[in-house]
Amino acid sequence: MTSKEMQRDFLEKDTALMRDIAAQLGRPLRYHVATFGCQMNAHDSEKLKGILTVCGLEESGEDEADLIIYNTCTVRENADQRVYGRLGYLSGLKKKRPDMKIALCGCMMQEPHVVEKIKKSYPHVDLIFGTHNLYTFPELLYRTFTEDARIVELLDSSNESAEDMPSERNYAFKSGVNIMFGCNNFCTYCIVPYVRGRERSRTPEEIIAEVKTLVSKGVVEVMLLGQNVNSYGKTLEPQVSFAELLQQVADVEGLERVRFMTSHPKDLSDELIEVMKKNKNICRHLHLPVQSGSTSLLKKMNRKYTREKYLELVDKIRAAMPDISLTTDIIVGFPGETDQDFEDTLSLVELCGYDSVFTFEYSKRTGTPAATMPDQVPEAVVKERFARLLETVRRTGEKASGRFEGATMPVLVEEKNREEGLMTGRLEHNIVVHFPGTPDMIGTIVDVKLDSCKGFYYLGHRV
Ligand code: 5AD
Ligand code: SF4
C-alpha cells in the first residue's frame, strides 16, 4: 500500500470511529481549528477542516469543541506568545471536559525548543505534528482518539503533500492553490527556511489539474501560493518558470481571477510582467515585500537587491501596468538600523505609492543569523520609528487607494457586510468595496461605481 492509500484507509476508519463516538454521545463530534499564520497556513487549515468534515465532525466555537487544533505560525515571537497564552486557557477548559482533545501543528512545531517546552509545561496537549506531517493527518486523528499517550509526529522534510486530500474551502468561489513549499533564500531575520525546509515545486500538470477541478466546482478566483513564487520550478526537470506556469493557469477556461503570493523582488522577471500585462484575468496587484529602503540594511538582511534595483523594478512594473496596486512588508528595527537607514525606508514608501504596507517590529528568532548580530536596536527607538512609519503608510496609502474614486469597476462579491443591506467585495486590485446588494450576489462579479474612498476601502453602488 502506498502512503497515500494508507491515509485514505485511515480516513474510512476515522469516519467509522467518529460515527461510533457520536452515537455514544448522542450528537455529532465538534471541531475548532484556529489559524495563526499566513495564507499558506490558512490553506493548511482548510485541508484539516476538509478531512474533519469528511469524517463527520461539525465546526464549532472553541468552548464547545471535542477537538481543538491550533495551526501555529512562528515568523515573529508574538505569534508564539499568543499560542502559549491560549494553551493556558485550554488547560482550564480540559479540566472541565477531560475527553476533549487538543492538537498543535504548523510552523512553530518545527522548532525543537518549542516542542520541548510544550511536552514539559503543557501536558494537556494530545497531539503535536509538523508542517511536513499534514498528509498523515487521517492517521494522527485516528490515533489521537484511540491511544492514551500523547502523540508527537515531526519530520524535517517530506516529498509527500496533502494536496489531493479533501479540503473545506472558507469561500465557495475562491481558493488558494499551493504551487511550491519551503524557501531557499535565507533572509537573515527569517525562521521560515529552517521550519519549512528547502524549496520544492509541484508540477504544472498537478497544479493545472487542481485549478480545473476547482473551476468545475464553481471557483472563480485562485491564489497561487508559495514562500517565493518567483523561484517556482527551479527544482523541476525540465525547469518551468513562474511566468510560464502563470500563463497556463490564466488559460484555464472559466477562471475569472488569478492572484499569487509572495514575490521576492530579487527575481521578478520581465517575462512575468509581460504575462501579467497580457492577461486580463491576472489581477492587477503585486505584493512585493521590500523589508527596508536602505541598501546597507538590505545587504545585512541578505535580500540580494539594492534600494535602487527595487525602485527600478517598481518603475518597470508601473510602466507596464500604470493602475497596478502594490503592497509590501517592512521590518522596523533590524539590527544595526541607523536613523539614516530608517529615513531611507520612509522615503522609499513615499516614492513607491503603496496601497498598503504590512509593518512589523523586528523580532529576534533564535537560530537565525540576525539574532546574534551586533547593535540590536533599543525597544524605545523601534517603537518611535514604528509610529512614524505607520503615519507615513497611512497618509501615502490613503492617497494611493483613492485613485479610483468616481470610476466604475468590477467587484467580486465576497460576503455580507455587518451593516444590514450592504455587501462586501474586492477589486482585482485587492481593495475592499462596500455597496448595497443582496447575498445572492456572493461569488459573482458585478460592476460598482466607487463613490467615495474612506481611507483604505470604497463605498459605492451597483450600476
Ligand atoms: N521579525 C519581524 N518581521 C519578520 N518577518 C519575517 N521574519 C521577521 C522577523 N524576524 C516579516 C517579513 C515578512 C513577513 C511575512 O513577516 O516582513 O515579509
Ligand atoms: Fe506562514 Fe511563515 Fe508563519 Fe509558517 S512561519 S505560518 S510559513 S508566515
Image: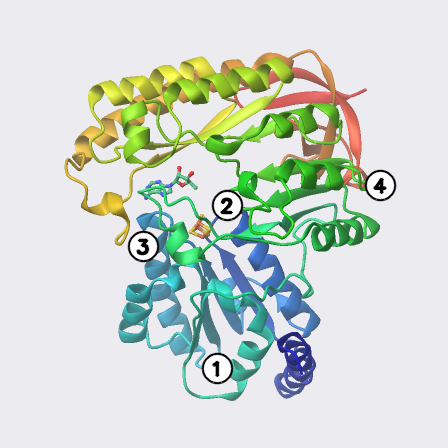
Q: Confirm whether residue 322 shows in the render.
A: no
Q: Secondary structure at mark 4?
A: loop
Q: Which residue is under mark 4?
A: 253
Q: Which residue is mark 1?
A: 99
Distance CA(mark 3)–CA(mark 1):
26 Å
Give me the C-alpha separation between circle 4 and circle 2: 27 Å
Count how many numbered circles sit on residues in the image. Answer: 4
Which of pointers 1 and 2 indicates the residue nearer the eye?
2
Which residue corresponds to mark 3? 81
Tell me how far mark 1 sits from mark 2, CA to CA. Answer: 38 Å
* Mark 1: C-beta under 8 Å from nearest atom of ligand 2: no
* Sequence-first tag of 4 and 2: 2
Among all residues in the image, which is located at the extreme front?
238
Neighbourhood count class around disc 4 (C-alpha, 10 Å): few under 14, some 14–19, many 20 upward:
few
Q: Kindly indicate the quadrant of the structure image that contains residue 284.
A: top right
Q: Which residue is mark 2?
A: 227
Q: Secondary structure at mark 2?
A: loop
Q: Position of residue 413 (x, y in %)?
A: 73, 35
